[in-house]
Amino acid sequence: MSLSTFPTTSETEENRTTEPQRPTRLSRLGKSFAMFRNPKSITGLVILGIFALVAILGDVIAPYGPLDKDFYALKQPPSAEHWLGTTHLGEDVFSQIVYGTRGVLVVGLVAGVLATFVAVLVGVAAGYLSGWRSESLSALTNVFLVIPGLPLIIIVASQYDNPSIVLISAVIAITGWAWGARVLRAQTMSLRNRDFVQAAKANGERLWRIIAVEMLPNLTAIIASSFVGTVTAAVLGLTTLAFIGVIPITNLNWGTILFWAQQNGAFPDFWWWYVPAGLCIAILGMALSLVNFGIDEYVNPRLRSAGERARAMRKKGMSLTGGVTEVRTADDAAAPPDAAPEPEEREAALRR
Amino acid sequence: MRFLLRRLAFYAFTAWAAITINFFLPRFMKGDPITAYLQKHQSEFNPEAIDSLRTLFGLESDRSLLQQYIDYWGLLLHGDLGRSFSRGLAPVSDVIASALPWTLGLVGIATILSFFIGTGIGSLIGWRRGSRADYVVPFATFFSTVPYFWMGLIVIAVFSTTLGWFPASHAYDKGSSPEWSWDFIGQVIAHGTLPAVTIVVASLGGWILGMRNMMITVLDEDYVTVAEAKGLAPQRVMTRYAARNAVLPQLSSFALALGFIVGGTLVMELVFSYPGVGKLLLDATNAKDWPLMQGLFLVITLAVLVANILADVAHAILDPRTRMMES
């Protein structure tokens, strides 16, 4: 805007104005991902990334087709040819796991997105509205919280001869959105009366803008954690359903591998057949909970700082849980803050 | 007692919703397995049983939906859930009644154990925050993300097949029948140990984590500092001041967890061939025994509802605020 009034300096001016702008946009983007910026979340996200890569590049990674049969190698233990051994039909277990990753992740993702969408819609609406509309939405949420999910999924899935992957995801999502909606409702209710929302209301902002611009950014951490939670539940639900045999065996995932392993007496001798698939589910679940731990610590910083503080006090020889508070000597108390300047400060001082 | 009325209204509404969902489930069903079954086995039924089945499954196309709905309620209030196809046409309510005690006993004990152990460990870890006790958390989380059926199968493989310490399946030895004798009770305990222990291990993580996080949050509150400053014994501060308040959210998730636990026992009963409600539901699904499936779903939902009511009462006893705020 100011560029037009000073056409002569446009080039340098432009450089100068765009430079400070870019970091702000970047940092704003960074801020909305701040809940992932801690070691726990990053570890979890890296593991998830590896699984996602395996799912995408499945055809490249897997040495054999998932159902390729090698009748000369039945129930073989791991070898150079078959890294994780073979099944009773000579199928390569490693390839099955690689291909199975796709089924697990797709269902987890679709169910997670669907459930989170419903949870945000119902939860935020129930929190923002008041009166009978809020009450009825909250009653709906509570009904879905009480209805037992797995039995309902089994009954619904058993009505179809060949339930599609989308149908399974949808049913898992229908039974899994309520918890997120409940948490979101509580948080939205506390946001509704904050000053900045009241100010936006007084300014005559439209409802959807208040919700989308003022409220949602403050709910991202809770939305993210409810998303991660539903994905975990969906992964466990899918593998359980596949193991029970409710999901058609044509849909290859880790649960199907365990289904076949159990049907063909793999327990306990053929460990290579059932251990990897179960471990994969556990590692994926662990990665998802790590992400959620990170979000928890971001939402409630005490969770992290309490441990750090306690450790720091113990180093000074004080007990946090002891009944008697020890008196610190003067030099003990004064030393730490002054003696160790921030590294950046020290660097700056050196440069000067 | 507005609080009590509101909760009662909620439970009445939820029960109504569950029963209504149950009413509509078979009406959305594709195809009509019931009519086919009825035609094939017409001679085995008495007309009364056929009538109730037709009502339960919406086969009376000559009557209006509302009339069907009213008839359906009438049957439920009489405790008539139809006849089970796969169990020799025994009344569904009798079939369920024979399986329910096993699930309630085993799962009830395991769940309560898990809640108390997990909450206890969690409050200790929260109290000793920053110490080595924190390392319990990742392990407990790992066990709660491990798929339950997988853990169950491995436990069977190790402790039953290989070591032979515990029986692998069923609720009591083959050949004996339920009776009140020491021998039989011993059998039930031996058969129940593995399932109960796996349920506890699998569900412990959630209780530990929830309690630890609440403890850490509560320990920062002023009243805890005041209690410490007054010179109260640390033990007392931990149990009476911190843990008593930290446990409240645990209670409400305890109620909610019951829903998931009913689902989880389904898998447990499959893995251990335990003759409970979950196994019954799976058998009914495989046999396409619609009346039994429908009845089981209703009973499971109502059981979760009752558990919620109990948790609510406990919450109200422990936290006077829930009673005060609403009135």
Image (spheres, rainbow, N blue to C red):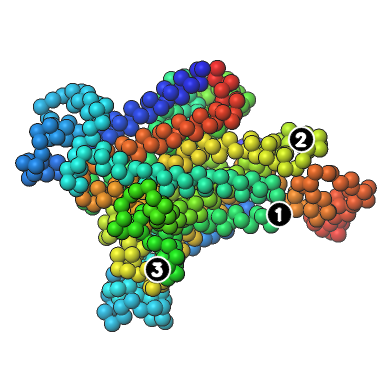
- The first of marks 3 and 2 along the sequence is 3
Q: Residue B227, labelled with which disc?
A: 2
Q: Is residue B54 left or right of residue A343?
A: left
User: What residue is at 33 percent from the left and 76 percent from the top?
Assistant: A75
Determine whether, in the image, residue A216 is placed left or right of residue A76: right
Crowd rating for badge 1 (residues with CA inside 10 Å; few <14, some 14–19, many 20+): some
Residue B235 place in picture, x, y as percent = 72, 43
Local secondary structure at mark 1: loop
Q: Residues within 10 Å of mark 3 (few under 14, many from 20)?
A: some
Amino acid found under the numbered disc labelled 1:
Ser
Residue B169 in view in this figure: yes
Q: Position of residue B298 (x, y in %)?
A: 31, 36
Residue at the limit of the structure toward the front, as seen here: B181
Do the residues marked 3 and 2 share a common chain? yes
What is the chain identity of the residue bearing mark 3? B
- Whether callout 3 and callout 1 share a subunit is answered yes
Dot label at residue B161: 3
Residue at 29%, 30% (x, y): give it. B20
Residue A326 % position (x, y): 86, 46
